[in-house]
Image (tube, grey):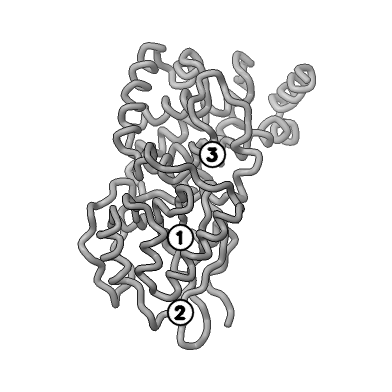
Amino acid sequence: MRTATTDMITRARAGDGDAFRQLTEPHRRELQVHCYRMLGSFQDAEDALQDTLLSAWRGIGAFQERASIRTWLYRIATNRCLDALRSANRRPAAPWDISEIEPPEPTRLGEAVWIEPFPDALLEGAINTPLGPAARYEQTEAISLAFVTALQLLPARQLAVLILRDVLGYRAKEVADMLDTTVESVTSALKRARAGLQRHQLPPTGNHEPPPAPGSAVEQALVAKFTRAYSASDINALLALLTDDIYLSMPPIPLEYHGRTDVARFYATVLRPDWTYDFVPTRANGQPALGTYLRASAGIRHGIGLVVLTLSGDQISAITRFDAGVLPSFGLPRSLPR
């Protein structure tokens, strides 16, 4: 195996594109997930992945095999993401997008308004990769919306260190080499990042039951109850499904509602009995999700967004609604026929 890899590296250095693809393709999916954790945006992650592969192709001639191809690619990807985080072109907050409805006063305004969901269909082979000895998180936990959102509130350098150390399990010396810094600097940044992550992570997970198994009867029943209550504009049935500390957000709109009382105010305002909804099930960030469509008078059902549900036992602990622009990433159409 080692001989085969060395041969491919030699061929890639000589300009063999097929050899380069054989070296990098096994790591493509996990690198995309890494960029997503760094940037919080599916589209930004795809751009960073392409920049990473282009930089790797241009730099393969200088690759000295001091680390594995995988570690070398992670070094490039991390630094491309840090460059992106330093740029001023991050997506801004968006205004409320339903003109005929005035939303109630939010509990607070969210900070991480550029978050996008990640399709589960692209997670296969990406979160089951071998981890280093320093890993502290399960890979499924580390792709959840709550975790990724909290990551975006960390300073860029701390964010990179925490992902490389606690999520991927690289040793401090390896991370220092990737970031061209010292082990002491990595250790200090990791300590601050862990404290910041604990402070920012919402909804709080310590008192929550674990979610039901993906695709289980419990999960399917809970999602079905949610769609029925939502379609019927049945506020009481909807509230019965929620934890006391339910957390509702809707990036890139910064409005956030925390707790049953505030979430009840929100749904009492926005749900209309005369509106007809249809839902198409999918999955995002390891969680059940629903492409949401509103039936127009002509019978065409227009996509109005994607709702991602965070489950705790047989209840819903968080609801995250994204705009219709994310539907194509999940293979969902902008509208459904009659």
Could you tell me which residue is drawn at 31 percent across and 24 percent down?
Answer: 192
What amino acid is found at the position of numbered circle 1 in the picture? Val
Q: Which mark is residue 276?
A: 2
What amino acid is found at the position of numbered circle 3 in the picture? Thr
Could you tell me which residue is drawn at 50 percent across and 16 percent down?
Answer: 171
* Contact? badges 3 and 2 (CB < 8 Å): no
Q: Could you tell me residue 141's position as x and y percent?
A: 49, 38
Instruction: Read off the residue under disc 3.
Output: 140
Which residue is situated farthest in the left direction here? 105
Q: Quadrant of the C terminus?
A: bottom right
Could you tell me which residue is drawn at 46 percent across and 64 percent down?
Answer: 226
User: What is the total number of numbered labels drawn onto the structure image?
Assistant: 3
Q: Could you tell me residue 2's position as x and y percent?
A: 75, 17
What amino acid is found at the position of numbered circle 2 in the picture? Thr
Residue 70 appears left or right of 82: right
Instruction: Read off the residue under disc 1.
Output: 307
Under circle 1, the secondary element is strand
Residue 119 appears left or right of 254: right
Under circle 2, the secondary element is loop
